[in-house]
Image (cartoon, rainbow, N blue to C red):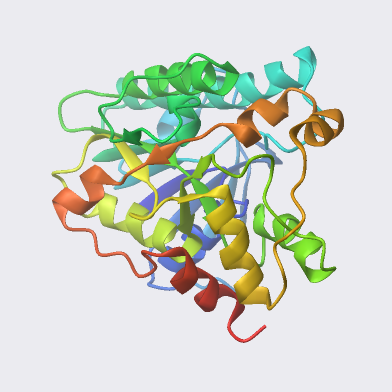
Amino acid sequence: MKVVIAGGSGFLGNALAWAWAEEGHDVRILTRSVPPGHARHESGTGTPGITHIGWTPDGQQGSLGSQLDGTTAVINLAGASINGGRWNAARKQVIRDSRVLATGSLAGAIAASPSPPAVFISASGVGYYGDRGSTALSEDAGPGDDFMAHVCVEWETEARRAARDGVRVVMLRTGLVLEKSGGALPEMARPFRFFVGGPIGSGRQYMSWIHRLDWIEMVRWIVETPAVSGPVNVTAPQPVTNVQFAHALGRALHRPALLPAPRFAVKLVVGEMADAIFASQRALPGVALAKGYHFRYPEIDIAFRGIFGDS
């Protein structure tokens, strides 16, 4: 099959692209590292393998239509990292625009395509729910009222524009993705390796997480499962509090988890982003469980054993 991945060079997209390429599928990665309209085949990926295609995610369709015609699936993972610097007005605008405009470009091209993909899978996040304490959150829970919740609402609204006859739209409300080779986990583990790790703030806030392998396999499962549409919580079935997470990470690394990071200290370092760090989201993968997805790493200790082994 032919798959197009926007944002396919990152921590999640690259691993997903290789999973399909190794099975002999034709994978096209939309990237700003190649001039718009140009293509570059990635050496070592075989034929058809992985091809990088230049695009401009500015809210306009441009020449995207020709790239998306005849595809099986379009996966949208485009968006600037929320950890790319202290949050100020300019940084928040980059976070919002990089998601909403890129999604608008893809959704508009799909809506106008004479031969659209069967499924459009667009990233979102559990930040959609805002700070909800210990409330269990299924996909039908309403949105929160902070910055990231507003961004996620706009993000998903743009994705829904792609919906038409024959096109399934799925929004991935992803939690914290765990893998030692990238994402947030290496930074989270560093203090533990120096024996100064521990909870953040009170530690009572819930963390919705997922092992990267389960994230990859769930996206692939969604492509192959026509009954799945709309928002999907891409999270493990056992969310944990920050204290539980810290203790599990300490166990995996054979380190104590005794030194909490005070909220005021975190806010001094990262500014308003602290609100997202301390937000509590107990998101449950209701759609995935109801439709038959089987988790390889349903519990945090199992996930950390898979990630760190006997570290």
Residue 137: percent from left, percent from top? 33, 34
Above-or-below relation of 139 to 11 = above
Residue at 48%, 45% (x, y): give it. 175
Residue 31: percent from left, percent from top? 62, 42
Q: Quadrant of residue 236?
A: bottom left
Residue 111: percent from left, percent from top? 31, 21
Please state, as top left, top right, bottom left or bottom right, where the N terminus lies in the image.
Answer: bottom left
Viewer-nearest residue: 36 or 201 = 201
Q: Would residue 259 be found to the left or right of residue 180 on screen?
A: right
Q: Quadrant of residue 182?
A: bottom right
Above-or-below relation of 40 to 108 = below
Viewer-nearest residue: 219 or 38 = 219
Residue at 25%, 24% (x, y): give it. 163
Residue 69 visible to the viewer? no
Please state, as top left, top right, bottom left or bottom right, where the C terminus lies in the image.
Answer: bottom right
Residue at 15%, 49% (x, y): give it. 290
Residue 99 visible to the viewer? yes
Q: Would residue 33 be found to the left or right of residue 252 on screen?
A: right
Q: Would residue 240 be found to the left or right of residue 291 on screen?
A: right
